[in-house]
Amino acid sequence: MLNVAVLMGRLVADPELRHTPNGIAVTTFTVAVDRGYAKAGTERQTDFIDVVAWRATAEFVCKYFRKGQMIAVEGSIQTRSYTDRDGNKRKAFEIQANNVSFTESKRSSENATYGGDSGRSYDSGSSYSSSYSSNKPVAVEEPAPAYTSGDSGDFEEIPMDDDLPF
């Protein structure tokens, strides 16, 4: 069986670090993800996907990510049932994050030539990693194309014709 979810989108709010009664770090955040298509004459739809991160992954997200930043999340889909305040049974779907990554470089006037945090990611099965070993100036290179560095501006929408060959 396979349960893998990979998504890339923008944070809708600053993530906040909380702790369970046992002292385990946890954060929940929502990622806005544009759908890959739009019907002719309509605007592109956006899905808002809830994500939960635990332990060091939660600490990493809260330390380095802010509202509006692009984030890539790899994890698994989890469901849970609960009863709301009115006594109605509800079911929640969320992504449990195993790996989170930056998807855009950190650009600011004071560190435009520094590596900054743009090379960092956190995998819950390992430790923090960085493609930069110090804060010394380094040449900024464009990253290889991948889901973590994609930009929807690199693509153009194909006009939809009703006369399709299939």
Image (cartoon, rainbow, N blue to C red):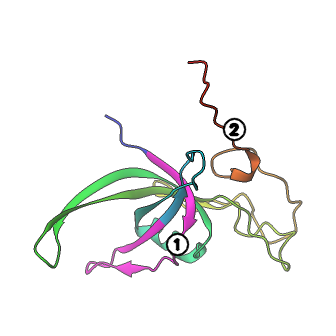
Of circles 1 and 2, the one toward us is 2
Q: Callout 2: helix, strand or loop?
A: loop
Residues under labels 1 and 2: Cα distance?
A: 29 Å
- Image coordinates for residue 120, horizontal then vertical, percent: 65, 62
Image position, residue 119 (x, y; %): 70, 60
Q: Is residue 32 above or below residue 37?
A: below
In the rendered structure, find residue 97 and report the number of the disc placed on it: none
Type of amino acid under label 2: Ile
Is residue 25 left or right of 162 when viewed as pictured? Answer: left
User: Does the CB distance between marks 1 and 2 fall below 8 Å?
Assistant: no
Residue lying at 61% horizontally and 72% vertically, measured from the top left: 68
User: Measuring 56% from the left and 76% from the top, which residue is drawn there?
Assistant: 63
Name the image quarter holding residue 129. Answer: bottom right
> Which of 136/45 is in front?
45
What quarter of the picture does the C terminus occupy?
top right
Residue of label 2 = 158
> Is residue 29 rendered magenta in the image?
yes
Of helix, strand and loop, which one carries label 1? Answer: loop
The kind of residue tagged 1 is Val
Task: Name the residue that disc number 1 marks.
Answer: 12
The region drawn magenta spans 5-30
Q: Quadrant of residue 70?
A: bottom right
